[in-house]
Image (tube, grey):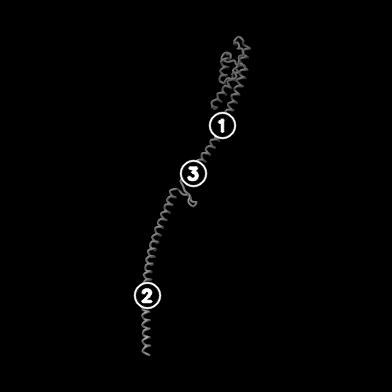
């Protein structure tokens, strides 16, 4: 309800009612003095008390008697109009207070919804951030950084594996070569030992032959 437009109208009507009431009192005094110039007053009629203020005002203007340029309105009508006017003001005031209360409740609800929406947005942002990131050793990083780190680590491990494989292959080759040379040296040593043993045996036989020969000559 637009109270800024209704209040001035109701106040204007209320003021007019008192003006008309004052004019009625003057009219009754004049009528008592100059009965020949007055019109007969209408008989009491049923007042539309439950009608809107505008219709009550129109009813009084239409149904009241006229004296010269004045309207003669019954005091009972004015009292009922005043009562209805006050009731309307109270109703407007109650509607206004109710509207203010409703607006306050809606503002509170809106703020609560805005806060709830903000919390949901923050939660969604956190979930999205967790979805787009990975945790490594307690360190939060984006998926791109995580993938780069993992592939770099894998690449480094492959390089190290290749390097150690080459070292192993080279070491194995050296070991085989050393083993072959060792076998060759061992064979040479065995051959040399056999040859030395043969020579020693030959020398021993020659020595024994010489001893035997000298022994025979002495006899």
Is residue 144 toward the left or the right of residue 103 in the image? left
**Disc number placed over residue 149 in the picture, else none:** none
Which numbered disc, 3 or 1, marks the residue that appears first in the sequence? 1
Which numbered disc, 1 or 2, marks the residue that appears first in the sequence? 1
Work out whether residue 166 or residue 93 is closer to the camera in this orientation and state it: 166
The correct choice, above or below, for 69 with respect to 123 in the image is above
Q: Which quadrant of the view contains residue 153?
A: bottom left
**Do the residues bearing badges 1 and 2 touch, measured as CB atoms within 8 Å?**
no
According to the picture, the residue beneath numbered tag 3 turns out to be 127
Q: Is residue 120 visible?
A: yes
Mark 2, residues whose alpha carbon is within 10 Å: few (<14), some, or many (≥20)?
Answer: few
Quarter of the image with the C terminus is bottom left
The correct choice, above or below, for 112 with respect to 57 in the image is below
Label 3 – label 2 distance at C-alpha: 86 Å
**Do the residues bearing badges 3 and 1 touch, measured as CB atoms within 8 Å?**
no
Work out whether residue 13 or residue 54 is closer to the camera in this orientation and state it: 54
Mark 3, residues whose alpha carbon is within 10 Å: few (<14), some, or many (≥20)?
Answer: few
Quarter of the image with the N terminus is top right
The correct choice, above or below, for 94 with respect to 213 in the image is above
Is residue 135 toward the left or the right of residue 197 in the image? right
Residue at 37% in and 81% down: 205
According to the picture, the residue beneath numbered tag 2 turns out to be 194
Work out whether residue 186 or residue 181 is closer to the camera in this orientation and state it: 186
Label 3 – label 1 distance at C-alpha: 37 Å
Which tag is nearer the camera, tag 3 or tag 2?
Answer: 2
According to the picture, the residue beneath numbered tag 1 turns out to be 102
Residue 206 locus on image (x, y percent): 36, 82
Secondary structure under the numbered disc 3 in the rendered image: helix
Secondary structure under the numbered disc 1 in the rendered image: helix
């Amino acid at each position: 309800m637009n109270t800024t437009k209704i209040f001035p109208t109701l106040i204007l009507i209320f003021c007019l009612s008192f003006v008309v009431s004052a004019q009625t009192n003057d009219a009754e005094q004049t009528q008592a003095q100059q009965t020949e110039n007055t019109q007969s007053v209408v008989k009491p009629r049923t007042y539309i008390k439950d009608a809107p203020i505008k219709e009550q005002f129109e009813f009084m203007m239409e149904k009241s008697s006229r004296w010269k340029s004045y309207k003669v309105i019954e005091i009972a009508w004015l009292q009922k109009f005043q009562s209805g006017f006050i009731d309307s003001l109270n109703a407007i005031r109650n509607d206004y207070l109710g509207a203010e209360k409703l607006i306050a409740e809606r503002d509170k609800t809106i703020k609560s919804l805005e806060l709830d929406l903000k919390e949901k947005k923050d939660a969604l942002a956190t979930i999205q951030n967790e979805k787009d990131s990975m945790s490594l050793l307690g360190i939060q990083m984006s998926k791109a950084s995580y993938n780069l780190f993992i592939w770099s680590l894998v690449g480094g491990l492959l390089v190290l594996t290749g390097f150690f494989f080459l070292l192993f292959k080279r070491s194995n080759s050296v070991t085989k070569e050393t083993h072959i040379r060792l076998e060759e040296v061992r064979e040479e040593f065995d051959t040399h030992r056999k040859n030395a043993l043969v020579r020693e045996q030959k020398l021993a036989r020659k020595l024994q032959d010489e001893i035997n020969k000298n022994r025979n000559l002495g006899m």
